[in-house]
Image (cartoon, rainbow, N blue to C red):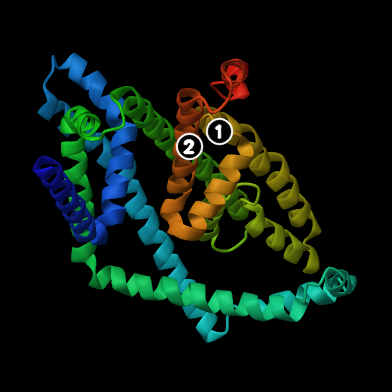
């Protein structure tokens, strides 16, 4: 009796202390999350270096960290600073009246007089679209301008977060295997289940980040290049925006280039508009249709519709981090229920044996 009381009291305080520790780490959630995600991506490189260096974990982790800085941290930092700087310039032009989104929308309405009537039939108010575009332009430009200033003011905070992330990556690379084994020993779910879930976690994280980022980089680059080739101002800025939009499956960069093509038609630049539409549908869109199922759907072992819904839901709830967290939660959900169905035997034995243990697409790939 006393032993049970002691165990329950200990578990109660274990839960309280664990929750308190998570609350303490809450301000660094984004930093810790991306440190873990980048570690998962670069861990195979660390293992290869370990084998070549005859098991020298510190040296291998340090070399891998330098590779991470060169491949990820420096390019992303330069790109973000360039985009924010260009966005601040756009906001300044917007304030001075050189850029007039409402005038552009009015040009489209005048060029296509039947368009407002068609949209009205579907319950779409063109006046609201005009007001929303104006508000979005003001809000987006103001945000970029404010962040351009805040980056200069909060340089120390930004550098601190980057250094903290790199610091965590080094120790996660060096001690990752030990920490994983420690977690498997601590959790009372059974080692086999925990290893399966850990493999699923790493598999989905690698596939989601690598797949989505590769697609985003390709589509953003192609979109920026076609804008530059057609002489559309702000090719770098719009290329990055299209890369960000590509994280949303089924919508993607078309939300940017399609209105631009419509505006080109409205201003009489028909050849440019046709080129942009052909390139957008035939090249940029094709990248998404071909690569996303291969890089994301196949490697996560999840159906395309689950990837779509979990990505959209993750982005809505967690912001930018959601394009990883959403599919990750969905993948773990499917893994937990797969284990439950196979091991708890909710069905009769012959029915349980008939349940497929993997996605039908796995056999095709």
* Within-10-Å neighbours for mark 1: few <14, some 14–19, many 20+: many
Q: Is residue 204 above or below residue 145?
A: above
Q: Residue at x 43, y 47 (%)?
A: 325
Q: Residue at x 9, y 44 (%)?
A: 2
Quick check: can you spot residue 153? yes
SS at badge 1: loop
What residue would you read off at disc 2? Answer: 331
Tell me: 169 left or right of 329.
left
Quarter containing the C terminus: top right
Tell me: 178 left or right of 244.
left
Q: Is residue 208 above or below residue 185?
A: below
Specify the quadrant of the image occupied by residue 196: top left
In the rendering, at what x and y percent does residue 127 appear? Answer: 74, 81
SS at badge 2: helix
Specify the quadrant of the image occupied by residue 360: top right
Is disc 2 in contact with disc 1, using a CB cutoff of under 8 Å?
yes
Q: Residue at x 56, y 52 (%)?
A: 312
In the rendering, at what x and y percent does residue 301 appear? Answer: 53, 29
* Within-10-Å neighbours for mark 2: few <14, some 14–19, many 20+: many
| Number of callouts | 2
Q: Residue furthest front?
A: 1
In the rendering, at what x and y percent does residue 304 appear? Answer: 62, 37
Specify the quadrant of the image occupied by residue 132: bottom right
What residue would you read off at disc 1? Answer: 302
Marks 2 and 1 sit apart, C-alpha to C-alpha, by 7 Å
């Amino acid at each position: 009796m006393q032993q049970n009381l002691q165990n329950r009291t200990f578990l109660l305080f274990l839960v309280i202390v664990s929750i308190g520790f998570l609350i303490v780490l809450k301000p660094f959630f984004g930093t810790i999350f991306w440190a873990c995600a980048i570690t998962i991506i670069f861990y195979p490189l660390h293992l290869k270096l370990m084998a070549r260096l005859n098991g020298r974990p510190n040296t291998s982790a340090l070399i891998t960290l330098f590779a991470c800085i060169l491949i990820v941290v420096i390019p992303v930092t330069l790109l973000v600073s360039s985009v924010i700087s260009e966005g601040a310039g756009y906001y300044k032009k917007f304030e001075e009246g050189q850029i007039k989104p409402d005038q552009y929308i009015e040009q489209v309405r005048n060029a296509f007089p039947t368009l407002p009537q068609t949209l009205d039939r579907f319950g779409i108010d063109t006046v609201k679209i005009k007001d929303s575009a104006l508000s979005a332009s003001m809000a987006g430009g103001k945000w970029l301008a404010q962040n351009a200033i805040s980056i200069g003011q909060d340089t120390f905070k930004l550098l601190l977060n980057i250094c903290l992330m790199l610091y965590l990556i080094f120790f996660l690379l060096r001690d990752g295997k030990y920490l994983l084994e420690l977690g498997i020993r601590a959790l009372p779910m059974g080692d086999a289940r925990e290893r399966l879930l850990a493999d699923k976690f790493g598999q989905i994280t690698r596939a989601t980040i690598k797949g989505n980022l590769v697609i985003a980089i390709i589509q953003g680059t192609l979109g920026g290049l076609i804008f530059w080739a057609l002489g559309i101002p702000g090719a770098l800025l719009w290329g990055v925006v299209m890369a960000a939009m590509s994280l949303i499956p089924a919508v993607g960069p078309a939300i940017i280039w399609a209105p631009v093509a419509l505006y080109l038609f409205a201003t009489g630049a028909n050849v440019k508009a046709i080129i942009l539409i052909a390139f957008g549908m035939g090249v940029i869109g094709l990248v998404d249709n071909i690569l996303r199922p291969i890089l994301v759907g196949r490697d996560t072992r999840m159906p395309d519709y689950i990837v779509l819904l979990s990505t959209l839901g993750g982005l809505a709830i967690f912001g930018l981090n959601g394009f990883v967290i959403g599919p990750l939660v969905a993948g773990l959900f499917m893994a937990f229920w797969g284990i439950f169905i196979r091991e708890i035997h909710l069905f009769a034995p012959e029915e349980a044996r008939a349940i497929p243990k993997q996605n039908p697409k796995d056999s095709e790939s």
